[in-house]
Image (cartoon, rainbow, N blue to C red):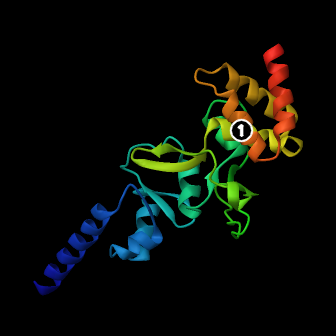
Amino acid sequence: MLHGQIFRETVLSVIAAWQSLPDTFTTRTARARGVHPRDLYKWRDGAEIVELSRGVFRRADAPPASYPDLLAVAYRAPRAIVCCVSAAAVHDLTDELPAAVQIAVPTQDRPPRISYPPTEVFRFDADTFEFGLSSIEAAPGERVRIYDPARTVVDLMRLRHRLGEPLAHAALHRYLRRRGAQPAQVLRLAATLDVYGPVRLALDVASAG
């Protein structure tokens, strides 16, 4: 009888730990809630939770995530900001889908090493790192840091020789066609980020067309 009682208490304890976990969580969070790593990986192997990235999990009964890869990377690198082509895809500034999640970190930070999902890291100047910072809901109630459309356009222009001039110019044209576009804001950001000349010229060409 005693052994049966201990078994039931153990099962109830595990269930309580499971129910206390948020929709998305890390190994550290699970351990803090009393979950043994053995149970954690048993749940993963039993498809009760999904491993989004190393040490990042999502409950199988949670609402679907709109951007699971961005969510996973945000848990691995909380200070990072989704940028460049990844941000452009989210903001519907391009139809191109990057092969890796593109994130920015301040120049003084050590770049995170994330093999899955594939991740490409850019190092941006710390003084202007959070200019144009916004967020999106990557999963219900869970937001991820991302650059807004204007900053994204400027970054694509700054990195056009690396990411492609056609991509940068197409994103600028698409941005200008959207309701609420703010060319003046783009120019202010371009001046701050030392790419005013090319952006001014691209805006003039777009306006003339």
Extreme residue in the right direction: 161
Residue identified by numbered label 1: 188
Q: Position of residue 17 (x, y in %)?
A: 29, 69
Q: Which residue is nearer to you in this view: 67 or 62?
A: 67
- Residue at 56% over, 57% down: 74
Q: Is residue 45 above or below residue 96?
A: below
- Residue at 39% over, 57% down: 48
- Residue at 61% over, 34% down: 91
Q: Is residue 169 above or below residue 69?
A: above
Q: Which residue is nearer to you in this view: 168 or 45?
A: 168
Categorize mark 1 by other alpha carbons within 10 Å: few (<14), some (14-19), many (20+). Answer: some
Q: Position of residue 129 (x, y in %)?
A: 67, 55
Q: Quadrant of the C terminus?
A: top right
Q: Is residue 32 above or below residue 183?
A: below
Q: Is residue 192 above or below residue 14?
A: above
What kind of element bears circle 1? helix
Q: Position of residue 155 (x, y in %)?
A: 75, 43
Extreme residue in the top direction: 209
Q: Which residue is nearer to you in this view: 63 or 137?
A: 137
Q: Quadrant of the N terminus?
A: bottom left
Can you tell which quarter of the image residue 59 is in? bottom left
Q: Position of residue 60 (x, y in %)?
A: 40, 51
Is residue 35 visible in the rendered image? The answer is no
- Residue at 87% over, 46% down: 162
